[in-house]
Amino acid sequence: MMTDGGPGPRITTRVTELLGIEHPIIQEGLGPYKTVQLAAAVTNAGGLGTISMPGMTAGAQGVRDLRAYIEQACELTDGTLAVNIPVGTAKGAEPPELLPFSAAYVGCVIDALRDSAIAQRLRVITTSAGPPGVVRRAIADSGLIHAHKVGGTRQAIRAERDGVDVIIASGYEAGGHTHARPVHTIVLGANVTEAVDVPVVIAGGIRDARGILAALALGADAVAMGTRFVASCDNPDWDDAYAQRVLAMQEGEDVVFPAVFGPSRGLASDGLSELLSFVGSEAMTESELTAWKDDRLIIAQRDGDVTHGIMPCGQVASGIGDLIHVAEFVPGVVAETAALLERLSGLFGGTGRPESDPRTRTRAPS
Ligand SMILES: Cc1cc2nc3c(=O)[nH]c(=O)nc-3n(C[C@H](O)[C@H](O)[C@H](O)COP(=O)(O)O)c2cc1C
């Protein structure tokens, strides 16, 4: 961590160097609706913003939407952007076979790079859900930096072997798709940073300087946040009701439910209860159920229907009590991380407990 005489402290890591970004702070994919303005805001603040994918069942319209989102985000920033595509594979297929929607979206991203204005900005693809090997060659050939999200150390080792450039280690407490075998961020982060040589981004439960410093101590080269950025003033693509539900969430209120690629973590709602009532029933075929879930996720994000909708959300929401302004938050949280490190170093000088920092408290414990 250094103060370079510029506007504030900087944390220089392998990720900031590789991606050419100012701060090792990533807003990760928040599908299945758009995060065009949020992604641009995070990038403009010096972090890495991610364009989210528009659902698994949108077909050819989804591809057109994704291309539009990429173009719109690139018009809002000159900085580096990422796009997130879950790379699902067909059940039981050996060798793994990429699902058609993932293939179409990855193809759309690679095709968009033919536009030089897009290629200058869209430099990163983050994949998630399935093994990255199925798309690795196409992504490597495209020149994009490839980050892959994992929930276990074995998956991280395999992703590194497949050739990805960066691993995102996402702990069980994360919002959205989480993992069949629950390994939490503090355990997973340390295990993954020990197990692989490529840069590691730690995600799951991070909301402020304390989480960032902890992730750096675990060996991370950056952090990714999802839920923290949902509760933001700079996500006007979504109805504000979603962010308000995140702010209202109490500890222990989150629910893990069956999603398309495995378990997902979200907020309780009538829509989620309805989904849980389908478990074990044959009310819908698998593809009908996937379309139903896409629709319920989108009505929550786009329309603010927090009653009938399904709302992915991390456990960290229980500690989030304010909406952030991204332009202040990103450099501000880096400055707080530097200050926190300095205060903690006082512990080693025998000066007693460091003072608590009121700025990191955004909500009274519930
Ligand atoms: C509303 C919401 C939607 C999400 N959608 C996606 C997605 O489309 N693809 C993906 O890889 N991860 C998705 N995630 C997971 C995030 O990218 C990120 O890994 C996670 O939010 C990190 O944990 P945190 O919420 O504790 O910060 C989503 C998370 C949330 C909260």
Image (cartoon, grey):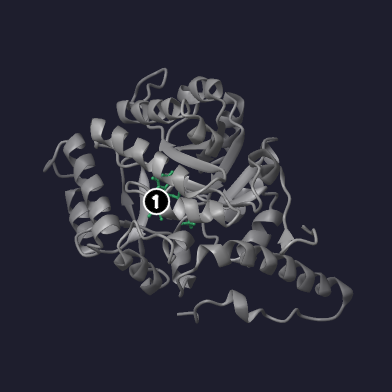
Kindly identify the amino acid type of the residue bearing the numbered disc 1: Thr
Q: Position of residue 219 (x, y in %)?
A: 70, 49
Quarter residue 273 falls in? bottom left
Q: Quadrant of the C terminus?
A: bottom left
Q: Where is residue 296 in the image (x, y as percent from the top left)?
A: 22, 52
Specify few, some or many for label 1: CA neighbours under 10 Å numbering under 14, 14-19, or 20 or more: many
In the rendered structure, the answer to whether residue 287 lies left or right of residue 170 reads left
Occupied quadrant, residue 347: bottom right
Image position of 344 (left or right of 290): right
- Residue sitting at the far left: 283
Residue at 59 percent across and 61 percent down: it is 330
Asked whether 127 or 40 is in front, the reply is 40
The answer to which image quadrant residue 180 occupies is top left
Mark 1 falls on what kind of element? loop
Residue 44 seen from this side: yes
For the N terminus, give its image quadrant: bottom right
Q: Can residue 310 be seen in this view?
A: no
Q: Which residue is located at x 67 percent, y 69 percent?
A: 336
Q: In this view, does 185 lie above or below 103?
A: below
Q: Which residue lies furthest to the top in this view?
A: 95
Residue named by callout 1? 35
- Where residue 189 appears, x then y in whole percent? 62, 49
